[in-house]
């Protein structure tokens, strides 16, 4: 018979007992901030701490990425990209019928008005993201895991750069510094580049973490020291109670809590639907290959916008990957995509040693407007959502944690969260 446990994890009786579903970077950062604020926190995840999408991403704290995916520049490239089944943007044909409603919303998110407001919101969120991430890293004692070498975006012609300038202008308006570099300046920022890259945009304030899995685990150690606890368990159902919420685990066990945070990445909509919130969350599957340390002397993150992938120097190797595949949560990975990006990377960095790589796929949790879902559920203020960060979950994790903590404490939020509400769809 199923048992019912009230989650009482000690601590001050006046504080809420909180359950967080999901130990990805968003759940981890949220656990850290809630523990700092004195809450008793239990994190549930079916795998472990930072073991899924948050473990294998490109490690960027991409505070300058304020343009939504449905931006004009990307929308122009999509038809060409779709022609290549292993290219930067692909749709698995069998998944297309299910995807159509999301694609329609994605297309609507590319209108001038929608883009203006989502870019503005993303800008505000990124300012908070930078402030909160650096402050959290400091408090957690993991500042040494943040690298400050910047990002170099590379173009194969002046015309390609010109086509991207509208986006760079929008970033400039959002306060982002960048420098256009050519010739010796370009070669100094990254020696060994193929001469096909004639011009670059350098963003000096871009940051990376040394390795996203290690970084997530290090932040968790901090949360754990403050009292956060972890339990490996798969959540089958969530429900509101008259006061608080109830979580049913896959083994039938029921846990009750005063406050529930849903931070289950690309699976979150399956839980939010049970509380009456039909959130159009899709997954943009992304692929990469991590090569051993020493595969190439990558000086900073390199971005190839025409091919939608990046090369990232990690303390644990060199990671080559990116791309978007719309194929849902169930279809098996197609690692030919990882191999296709690696082949291109070898062309772009001829001295790259492509031996001994480890292939990986992750599920970006993506909304049509590229903004996360941060807000109360429609059913009850005792459930807060924290998901849908798409390409930017690592970057925005600490900002999300701050907003969730403020919502939970019924404090004024650092920025208006109505644009992030689940009700916006
Ligand atoms: C190729 C690639 C490159 C990327 N590069 C970057 C980058 O450089 N910078 C950046 O900011 N972002 C990047 N991202 C995006 C980033 O990785 C994601 O936005 C982020 O990891 C999402 O974190 P999360 O905590 O929301 O979800 P996840 O990391 O997916 O964590 C959710 C957790 O919830 C658990 N879960 C789900 N359902 C249940 C359930 N029912 N019961 C129990 N547990 C459950 C899962 O097991 C999982 O561990 C990249 C993504 C990809 C794929």
Image (cartoon, rainbow, N blue to C red):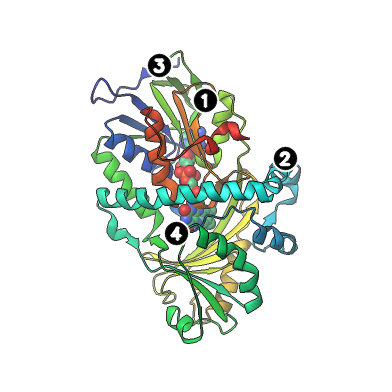
State the CA–CA distance, disc 4 to disc 3. Answer: 41 Å
Kindly identify the residue that appears in the image at 59 percent across and 73 percent down: 343
For the residues labelled 3 and 1, say whether their Cβ atoms are less than 8 Å apart: no
Q: Which circle's residue, 4 or 1, is located before the other in the chain?
A: 4
| 369 left or right of 357 in image | right
Q: Nearer the viewer, mark 4 or mark 1?
A: 4
Question: Toward the viewer: 236 or 220?
Answer: 220
- Residue 246 locus on image (x, y percent): 45, 20
Circle 1 is placed at which residue position? 237
Q: Taking 199 as reference, is 320 above or below it?
A: above
Circle 3 is placed at which residue position? 4
Q: Nearer the viewer, mark 4 or mark 3?
A: 4
| 410 left or right of 111 in image | left
Q: Taking 191 as reference, is 126 above or below it?
A: above
Q: Residues within 10 Å of mark 3 (few under 14, many from 20)?
A: some
For the residues labelled 4 and 3, say whether their Cβ atoms are less than 8 Å apart: no
Kindly identify the residue that appears in the image at 52 percent across and 78 percent down: 349
**Quadrant housing the N terminus:** top left
Residue 359, visible in the rendered structure: no
State the CA–CA distance, disc 2 to disc 4. Answer: 30 Å
For the residues labelled 4 and 1, say whether their Cβ atoms are less than 8 Å apart: no
Circle 2 is placed at which residue position? 101
Tag on residue 60?
4
Tag on residue 247?
none
């Amino acid at each position: 018979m199923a048992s019912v446990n009230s989650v009482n994890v000690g601590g001050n009786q006046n504080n809420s007992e909180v359950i967080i579903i999901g130990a990805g970077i968003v759940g981890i950062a949220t656990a850290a901030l809630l523990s700092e604020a004195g809450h008793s926190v239990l994190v549930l995840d079916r795998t472990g701490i930072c073991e899924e999408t948050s473990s294998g991403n490109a490690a960027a704290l991409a505070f300058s990425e304020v343009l939504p995916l449905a931006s004009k520049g990307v929308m122009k490239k999509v038809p060409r990209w779709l022609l290549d089944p292993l290219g930067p943007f692909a749709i698995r044909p069998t998944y297309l019928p299910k995807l159509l409603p999301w694609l329609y919303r994605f297309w609507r998110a590319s209108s001038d008005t929608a883009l203006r407001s989502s870019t503005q919101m993303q800008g505000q969120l990124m300012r908070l993201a930078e402030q909160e991430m650096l402050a959290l890293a400091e408090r957690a004692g993991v500042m040494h895991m943040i690298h400050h070498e910047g990002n170099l975006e590379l173009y194969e012609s002046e015309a390609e750069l010109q086509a991207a300038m509208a986006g760079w202008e929008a970033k400039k308006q959002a306060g982002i510094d960048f420098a256009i570099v050519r010739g010796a300046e370009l070669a100094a920022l990254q020696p060994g580049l193929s001469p096909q890259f004639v011009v670059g945009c350098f963003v000096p304030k871009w940051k990376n973490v040394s390795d996203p899995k290690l970084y997530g685990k290090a932040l968790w150690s901090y949360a754990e020291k403050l009292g956060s606890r972890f339990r490996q368990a798969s959540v089958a159902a969530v429900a509101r109670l008259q006061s608080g919420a109830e979580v049913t685990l896959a083994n039938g066990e029921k846990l009750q809590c005063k406050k529930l945070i849903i931070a289950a990445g690309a699976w979150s909509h399956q839980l939010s639907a049970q509380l009456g919130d039909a959130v159009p969350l899709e997954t943009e599957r992304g692929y990469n290959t991590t090569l051993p340390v020493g595969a190439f002397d990558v000086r900073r993150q390199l971005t190839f916008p025409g091919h939608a992938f990046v090369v990232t120097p990690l303390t644990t190797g060199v990671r080559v990957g990116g791309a978007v595949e719309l194929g849902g949560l169930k279809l098996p990975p197609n690692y030919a995509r990882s191999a296709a990006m690696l082949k291109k990377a070898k062309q772009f960095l001829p001295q790259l040693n492509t031996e001994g790589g480890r292939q990986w796929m992750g599920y970006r949790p993506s909304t049509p407007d590229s903004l996360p879902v941060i807000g109360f559920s429609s059913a009850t203020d005792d459930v807060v959502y924290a998901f849908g960060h798409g390409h930017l979950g690592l970057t925005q994790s600490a900002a999300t944690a701050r907003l969730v903590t403020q919502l939970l404490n019924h404090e004024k939020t650092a920025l208006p969260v109505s644009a992030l509400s689940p009700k916006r769809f």
